[in-house]
Amino acid sequence: MLLPMRWFCACKFLPVRFHETMFPYVALTADKTWQAGPYDGVELMPLHKHEKTGGVVVLRKFKAGHTIPAHTHPDANEWAYVLSGEWEESGVTYTTGALFYAPKGVRHGPHVARTEVISLTVFDGPLTIA
């Protein structure tokens, strides 16, 4: 005999304790400030830095009309998720929801901001540029 699907749940339902910390680290953008980035027209809002690896999580703002020249990050892999704006890469315009990945040491760009672009960007090592 088959039982209704509700009897086949492999989940454990645990009570949520709201007096306990859900995450060991929380960053609130209201507590952070934009800082000058490595290129004209780029600002960074550091959200977290890993003390051992030097890796960082930042919000990155490209001002409309700016082009970031081709470059490499010799010490870190980079992931950038577009939160808003129009980012042109190799003649193709990407918008909200695009995810870019550049392996450590691989040349990428130029990046063109057709509008103001905000991305959530992660470097798994120190943010260096060559």
Image: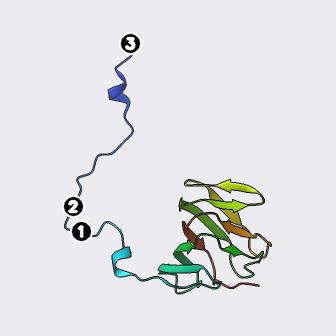
**Residue in the foreground of this view, choosing between 57 and 37:** 37
Residue closest to the eye, 112 or 25: 112
Tell me what residue is drawn at x 21 percent, y 61 percent. 17
- Mark 1 to mark 3: distance in Å? 43 Å
- At mark 3, the secondary structure is loop
Confirm whether residue 25 shows in the render.
Answer: no
Q: Which residue is mark 2?
A: 17
Q: Amino acid at mark 3?
A: Met
First in sequence: mark 2 or mark 3? Answer: 3
Instruction: Locate residue 7 relative to residue 99 in the image: left or right.
Output: left
**Residue density around tag 2, few if under 14, some if 14–19, many if 20 or more, within 10 Å:** few
Amino acid under label 2? Arg
- How crowded pointer 1 is (Cα within 10 Å; few <14, some 14-19, many 20+) is rated as few
In this picture, residue 42 sits left or right of residue 29: right
Q: Position of residue 77 (x, y in %)?
A: 68, 72
Res. 56 image quadrant: bottom right
Residue for badge 1: 20
Looking at the image, is 114 positioned above or below residue 52?
above
Spatial distance from mark 1 to mark 2, Cα to Cα?
A: 6 Å
Q: Give the residue furthest to the top.
A: 1
Q: Would you name the residue on which mark 3 appears?
A: 1
Instruction: Please name the amino acid that badge 1 sits on.
Output: Glu
Q: Secondary structure at mark 2?
A: loop
Q: Secondary structure at mark 1?
A: loop
How many numbered discs sit on the rendered protein?
3
